[in-house]
Amino acid sequence: MRKLLVGLLLLAACKQGKSNDAPPPPPGASDGGAATVATTDAATRLPTGQVLLPAAQPVPAPPPGLPPLPTDHAPTADEVSLGHLLFFDARLAADGTTACASCHDPHNGFSGDEPHSQTAAGRPNLRRTPALVNLAWHRELGWDGRGADRTSFLDSHAAGQLGHPLEIGLGRLLGSATYRAYFDRAAGGRDRLTTAKAALWAFVSTRYSGAAPWDRYEAGATDAVSPEVVEGYKLVNGKAQCATCHAPPLYTDLAYHRLGLIASPDEGRGRVEPTQAGAFKTPTLRGAVARRPLFHDGSAATLEDAVAWHLAGGRGQGADPSVVDRALPEIPLTPEEKAALNAFVRALSPAPDAAAVAAPALPDDVPGAVP
């Protein structure tokens, strides 16, 4: 009996030792299938088939000064984390060098820094790249608002800007086990193309512009701005009539107005609604200091130029007054009033946030590509 008991113990120990061997890779881990995801903040040795991912950062919260978020805006931390990677990864594009961030430059307020950027295919864009800030409140995307359906807009936008459909670029990235792990973590039961679109929207719709000096003043910090800025606010909501279109707290009415610009003829909203030819969406004044140049055609080199053009009633560039929106009348201001108006608009821009514009460390295991 004693010999039998010893034999059984030895057999159990042998089986236990075998169970501690590294398990085989999970099905599909080496052929583009799912990879086991391990989320941790510390580097550790993982069994074959597992991918170490950093913990996703919390979903950014709207900073002070902005209105409550729409009830249907509910990105997850894992979506934002994946979207951050995709937004900066030029390997999505046909040329391998053009990322979303190439045109929507984070250092330029997530907007274009030239009148006409180029697509991955080398074609010039019709308009300056718009700013991707406070999009959570937008129901229509683009200067002309053609992006009423975000999913279809992203399909056409990616195909035009990246040089091929989004799914082709994703096919390249999904050769990476790291990317597959990010996708699986964010998927929530969705396919990978749907997950990619949700992730990109989650990232761009959480690029907020708030917590500016004026917001601190409105919250009670009376020393956050100068008396000149306060006078500028009064002008915006009074004599200068800026708030007619640049309505607080977003400082845009999200509507379309005919500007009368003729230096670069463009149908604008007329491409969606023929009766609004020449109209463009009102850009937000929030974060305007970071954006150069301004307007959909980049025709205003500085913030001061843009303000002066509006005060002149949109009649610059030889525009016909009959085509200018009635919300844009000519308004004469004294030099002191103009200075106060510009000071207020500047007070709507927060201090630069290095973390908000930082490029992530991209996965380095994409086959045949170097990040």
Image: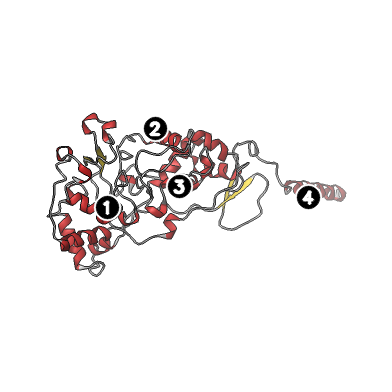
Q: Note whether 121 is above or below 235 in the view shown.
A: above
State the separation of the CA atoms marked 4 and 1: 71 Å
Q: Nearer the viewer, residue 17 or 258?
A: 258
The structure residue drawn at horizontal position 54% and vertical position 42%, both measured from the top left corner, is 96
Does the image show residue 182? yes
Residue underneath mark 1: 285
Q: Which of marks 4 and 2 is in front?
A: 2
Residue assigned mark 4: 13
Q: Residue 345: where, in percent of width, then height?
A: 25, 57
Q: Looking at the image, is 240 positioned above or below residue 275? A: below
Binning the other alpha carbons within 10 Å of mark 3 as few (below 14), some (14 to 19) or many (20 upward) gives many
Q: Is tag 2's residue or tag 1's residue first in the polypeptide sequence?
A: 2
Tell me the amino acid under the disc marked 3: Ser
Q: Residues within 10 Å of mark 4 (few under 14, many from 20)?
A: few
Q: Distance between the residues labelled 3 and 2?
A: 22 Å
**Residue found at the very far right of the displayed protein:** 3
Q: What element carries label 3?
A: helix
